[in-house]
Image (cartoon, helix red, strand yellow):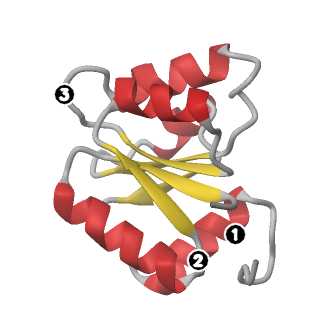
Amino acid sequence: MDEYVLIVDDDPDTQKILTKLLGFMKWQTQVASGGQEALARIAQRPPVLIMLDIMMPGMNGVETMSALKRDPATRDIPVVIISALGGDQRFKRLGATDVLAKGNFSLPELSRVVNHALGKSAPSTH
């Protein structure tokens, strides 16, 4: 497996939609259902990008983001917050590269957010 995007969300429908859309963009994905599982996966093999839900049981997205940003090994991994809460600026102050409104999972919007997070201007064809 080459580079991959880690989807961290406890909602199976969101996991499926993002996996499918990222697949159309030629990205391999892995899924974690919560913050603790995500940190364990990242420790085994860091992703190039993390799509992180905020509202999750157990370790929520804010706590997960804080853990990622405290660790020198993970602090530079771009994180896109997936949120129904709004709060773009608050999440960016916490270290998010971008914020994607939950439910706004069109391929063009996801492509824009992923390419922005990875510092690319053109769609990825890796």
Quadrant housing residue 74: top right
Residue that badge 3 annotates:
57
Give the camera-side residue of 38 and 69. Answer: 38
| Residue in the picture at 76% in, 77% down | 126
Residue 79 sits above or below residue 124 on the image = above
| Residue in the picture at 49% in, 35% down | 41
Residue that badge 2 annotates:
111
Say what amino acid the circle numbered 3 marks. Answer: Pro
- In the rendered image, the quadrant that contains the N terminus is bottom right
Q: Is residue 33 left or right of residue 69?
A: left
Residue that badge 1 annotates:
115
Spatial CA distance of label 2 from label 1 is: 6 Å
Say what amino acid the circle numbered 1 marks. Answer: Asn
Spatial CA distance of label 3 from label 1 is: 29 Å
| Residue in the picture at 60% in, 58% down | 4
**Pointer 3 or 2: first along the chain:** 3
